[in-house]
Structures are given as structure tokens and as C-alpha cells.
Amino acid sequence: MEEMLRVLVEGLVNEPEKIEIGSRKEGNVTTLELKVARRWHGKSYWQARENCKVNTYTYESLWCKIQRKNKCRYSWLGDKMVDYFEIGHIDNTHGLKGEMKVRNYSNNPKRFEELKNVLVEKNGTYIDYQIESVRYQKDIVLLKFQGIDTIEDAEKLKGNYIYIKREDAQTLQEGEYYVADLIGSEVYENDTLIGVLDNIFTAGAADVYVIKRKGKDDLLLPALKNVVLETDVENKKIKVAIPDGLR
């Protein structure tokens, strides 16, 4: 994992002078602290912890939490395009009037404000709910559905995942893909099958691909242009160039 972060830094920061990586483990969560030192020139990719004068060093920190036990879930059915995209999880109830604490899986922190309806998956069935209100408690979304007016009502939805239909998904820009369409893709290097894309998580400035390999540990690859060379969503194939330090 540390070697993957070094590759990530070298792909995003011009001529890093020094890289330091620290880590600590809290239960199932490993927290990594990445410190990058470089001379003050060019574009800064992350906000500097402190501003320094020319020819001195700027230290930048990136925190990422990787929870291996409960990895993100995505809807993928064999070689078929999925109809529903997972955008959140109902972690708990909030208060007595039907509000729920929701973990937002979208890269848009205000995503639920843009939606009128969502689907809650329960025992394999997708149930449509109309959003009544959205507010926030730090990084947690406090969501209220119409018809869910008591803590007892909200309790019944606790632990379930929230989806939207494909047609309600955000519009993609060139070079962007829905995560659900990438999961399950075969990953190749020089026409040699490396494994299958099993998961994607975000580590600061870039996504990281988790590739399941037969008889080997999972391979973690930063989604940089010099690493992920070609993506064929229709045929579910991805071509990569694996940096030497990650093999």
C-alpha cells in the first residue's frame, strides 16, 4: 500500500524532494498519512499545510482511510450493464421524526439535494421513496423520506442501501465512467490477463483500483493516465501498465 502511494505521488506532484508515509491501525481501519516535500514551484495539487517562501519546502498532507472489512458495494451482474447505481447507505436513525443518517457514496457531497426520489433495496426489492428534506451533520447526510415520520419507521430502513436508476445518474464527461460499469472488468497488461477489477476506492487525489488476482494478493493500482492506459466499458476490459514497485 505504501509503495502504491509513492507511485501516486510521483504521478501527481512534480519532482517531489521527499516522501514520508506514516500509518496507524484502529480496529479494521488503517489510516495513512502522506507527507510530500518539494520546492515551491508549479501548481500545488493539495492545499499546503503551511505557506513557505521561494526555495524553501512546502509540506502537504493527504489522509485516507481504507476500511477493508466493509468495502464499498456496487451492483454488477455478469457482463450486463446495471440498471441501478448505489449512492448511499442508511447507517442509523436520527431523532424521533423519521430522519436517517446516510453515508453518501457519490463524489458530489450535495447529490441528495438534486434528487426527488431514490430507491431503497430491501431483501432484493427496490422500493421507491420521495425525498422530503436533506440536511447535514458534518459529513453525514440527514435524510427524510415522505411517509417515514417516526423513529420506528426509520428503524425499519436502517442498514439498507440507497440506489438511483441509471437514467438519474450524473452526466459523464469524456474519460469518465460509472464505477458500477467498471467493476468486474478484466485487467490486462501487454495482452496478459492480470486479474479482475474487484473494487474502487478514493485515496485523496486519485481513485485506486483493487484487482483480484488468482493465487496472489490483490493488486492496488492508482488510476493515473500513465497506469490505466485504456478502458473498454462495453467489452469490460482495462489495459494497464503496472509500475515496477507495485508488481
Image (tube, helix red, strand yellow):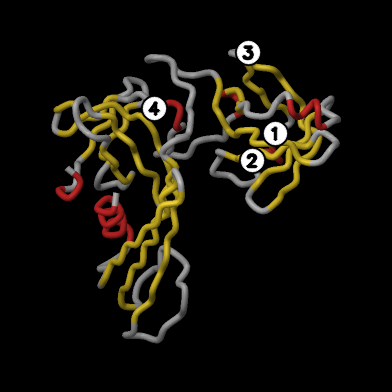
Q: Which residue is mark 2?
A: 111
Q: In this orientation, which residue lies closer to the viewer: 129 or 64?
A: 64
Q: Which residue is mark 3?
A: 125
Q: Which percent across, then down, holds residue 24?
A: 39, 57
**Residue underneath mark 4:** 183
Say what secondary structure mark 3 lies in. Answer: strand
- Secondary element under disc 2, as helix, strand or loop, is helix
Q: Position of residue 2 (x, y in %)?
A: 28, 54
Q: Residue at x 55, y 29 (%)?
A: 86
Q: Nearer the viewer, mark 2 or mark 3?
A: 3
Q: Residues within 10 Å of mark 2 (few under 14, many from 20)?
A: some
| Mark closer to the chain start, 2 or 4 | 2
| Mark closer to the chain start, 3 or 4 | 3
Amino acid type for the residue under numbered disc 1? Leu
In the figure, residue 54 lies in which quadrant? bottom left
Question: Image height check: is 119 above or below 223?
Answer: above
Q: Nearer the viewer, residue 93 or 183?
A: 93
Viewport quadrant of the C terminus: top left
Residue placed under numbered mark 1 in the picture? 115
Q: Earlier in the sequence, mark 2 or mark 3?
A: 2
